Amino acid sequence: MEKILQGNAITLGVCYYPEHWDESLWKDDLARMRARGIRVIRIAEFAWNKFEPTEGRFTFDFFDRFMEAAREADMAVIFCTPTATPPAWLTNQYPEVLNAGKDGVKLRHGARRHYNYNSPVYRRFTARIVEKIAGHYGKHPNVIGWQIDNELNCERDEFYSKSDTTAFREFLKEKYATLDALNAAWGTVFWNQTYTAWAEIYVPRTVISDSVNPHQVMDYIRFVSHSARSYAKLQSDIIRKYLKKGDFITTNGLFANLDNHKLRAESLDFITYDSYPNFAYCLDNQNSAAPGLKDRNWSRKLAETRSVSAKFGIMEQQSGANGWNTRMEAPAPKPGQMTLWAMQSIAHGADFISFFRWRTCAMGTEMYWHGILDYSNHDNRRLAELGEIHQKIERLASAAGGTYEAAFAVLKDYDNVWDAKLDKWHERIERASEAGIFEAAQLCHSPMDYVYLTGSTSLDELQKYAALFYPHAVILTEERAALLERFVENGGTLVLGCRTGYKDLTGKCPMRKLPGLLRKLSGADVVDYTFISPDDGKIIVDWEGTEIEAAVFTDVLEALENTQVVGTYTNNYYAGKGAIIRGEYGKGSVYYFGAAFNRETAAVFLEKLKIAEPYRAIVEAPPSCELAVRRNKKGRFLFLLNYAKEPAVVTFKRKVWNLDTEQPVTGPVELPPYGTGVYRMPEPTPGISVSGEAHRPAG
């Protein structure tokens, strides 16, 4: 039976809903899938009633018949637990399982993900249905893996039921033990919020201006993450009892208020992502974190996925137009974009691509969320393109199992990710720098990684990169500061941005000189700071003769011992004052930039640190093309992806091997609109190191 993510092949799959279609279609659907290269299907994530039509009455007849059809078609199956959509009989009889809004009003049956993780009743029903399904299908020869639920924390990443308040109190008791400790952590002396009994504490509720105590909200977000992870582990622990050798457990998507790294470590063999680049073209302008790059922004999300799970797949890959009947309407992918977006996922490390969905649903909220086939069931251009994708990936087999090679990394951690969600000051600078650094990396053809600082992050993980950006480490811990010191001491280059180190883990601002725990390492003294006013215009920094813009916020800096001011502000009341501090620490160096990073400024940093265009000795590509590199035991593979609706010319300065044509290539090559190419580079390549040109950043 077909396996996935074994390091020896790139496998295609599709999401299929046998309960949506007459049984007479099953055999033909599976045969048509096989003919276009589909070898794996995902099923059952919304089909609870098919297993338990009424409370306590279990039947497997429907999916037994479908699994027999899958067996006859030699189709591998990823089986899902159906807990994302509890049945009407359950929510009607046991309304306490429902989630609620912040005002306490319950979310009613009729959509999806309307349950809460902490309801003892829902956890009991969940455990029972997972036990029944896993026990029945766990040993089935066509089942190769399991998906837990569907998109944990999607639609709703906040939970306000009575069960959540009860569980939140227990979470806080375990964390703080005493109310005195909790009151101190939350700063409840402010606005007379002091608690004298655990029963006085609730999940955040509706208050004036929706301004709940931020330290309480930070702990609440941590609680939501804990709840989702606990719910996933409840299911994975049951499924593991029934796993065949070689089968896996995963879940799909990356969503907010969830520590996906802990989720994977506790419950999953790997993560799978749901990639919908067409969100960039939604008519209601959703998902515009890096609006200048449109669908190319999904490469940033794939880098996030790769940080969670070096081995990962795509459970839902865009194949048709977006659209619920209520929102997210977007155009159909143009010819070639379905291939482009699949290759985008592969370039970033995914060796399993499962398209959403086989046939567009004829009913319900997602009836405009198109799949490969339209309602008519006739062959169409997307089905033909699927066949072409299959042929293409067959020729890419030698690149399977390769790791993504990055020229540098951006550091993140969940404390700062969550703080930026609840703190508008933090959010503003974080949003600007995340987009700016990513866009600069893309347009400078400098592949990048994200690395999350967790309790288990090692120095070896950081030392894979010559340079690290930690744009706005607002919240710092002594452990993270010590790890960064060791990185720099051993020869690394660290780039910091404004607002570094002014909060502790509770989200409070201790009385200490900035940048707090990184003051010694950075060699910077923050003597003043301010948001940039709309009346100020652009704030310009002179960095040793190069002008860059200081975006959003400015820290005014002075140099401490053994550091120097290398960039100064040229306008506003702090003209002539320090904007960039550079210092040496051990064998390495640190840059403190007193602002957020926009695209142009980040590009200058990449150039000055000598990490821009690390593959310029091999290839020259226009800005419309993304460059990515994967490496395995068979060599180093260069992916070039043209996101433009016009042809793009790339020029190879050295001979490479085109995996599509199986021919050597040098000189100019034209990629068609939305075209892609994969090329094996010569090994060894003089002048190219594992992360690009054989040099380290300046300093």
Image (cartoon, grey):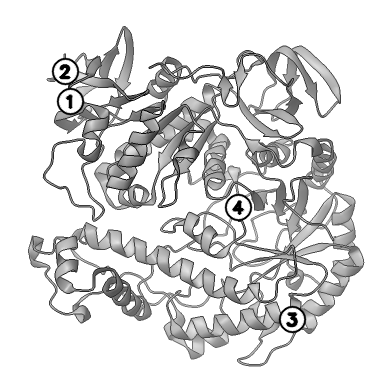
In the rendered image, the quadrant that contains the C terminus is top left
Q: Earlier in the sequence, mark 2 or mark 1?
A: 1
The secondary element bearing badge 2 is classed as loop
Real-space Cα distance between discs 2 and 1? 6 Å
Tell us which disc is closer to us: 1 or 4: 1
Q: Decide: marks 4, 2 in contact (CB < 8 A)?
A: no
Q: Quadrant of residue 158?
A: bottom left
The residue located at (49%, 20%) in the rendering is 611
Q: Secondary structure at mark 1?
A: strand
Which numbered disc flags the more N-terminal residue, 3 or 4?
3
**Is 401 left, or right, of 159 in this rendering?**
right
Whether label 3 touches label 4, CB < 8 Å: no
- What is the CA distance from the residue labelled 4 to the residue labelled 2? 46 Å
Report, in whole angstroms, how far the alpha carbon at label 3 lies from the one at label 1. 65 Å
| Residue at position x 90%, y 64% in the image | 73
Up/down of 386 relative to 125, above or below = above
Q: Which residue is mark 1?
A: 556
How many callouts does the rendering have?
Answer: 4
Q: Secondary structure at mark 3?
A: helix
Tell me if label 2 and label 3 are in contact, CB under 8 Å: no
Q: Confirm whether residue 597 shows in the render.
A: no
In whole angstroms, how far apart are the C-alphas of marks 1 and 4?
A: 42 Å
Q: Which mark is residue 274?
A: 4
N-terminal-most mark, 2 or 3 = 3
Of the two numbered discs 3 and 4 in the rendering, the one whose residue sits closer to the viewer: 3
Q: Which labelled disc corresponds to residue 116? A: none
Badge 3 crowding class, 10 Å Cα cut-off, few under 14, some 14 to 19, many 20 or more, is few
Residue type, numbered disc 4:
Asp
Q: Which mark is residue 577?
A: 2
Q: Amino acid at mark 2?
A: Lys
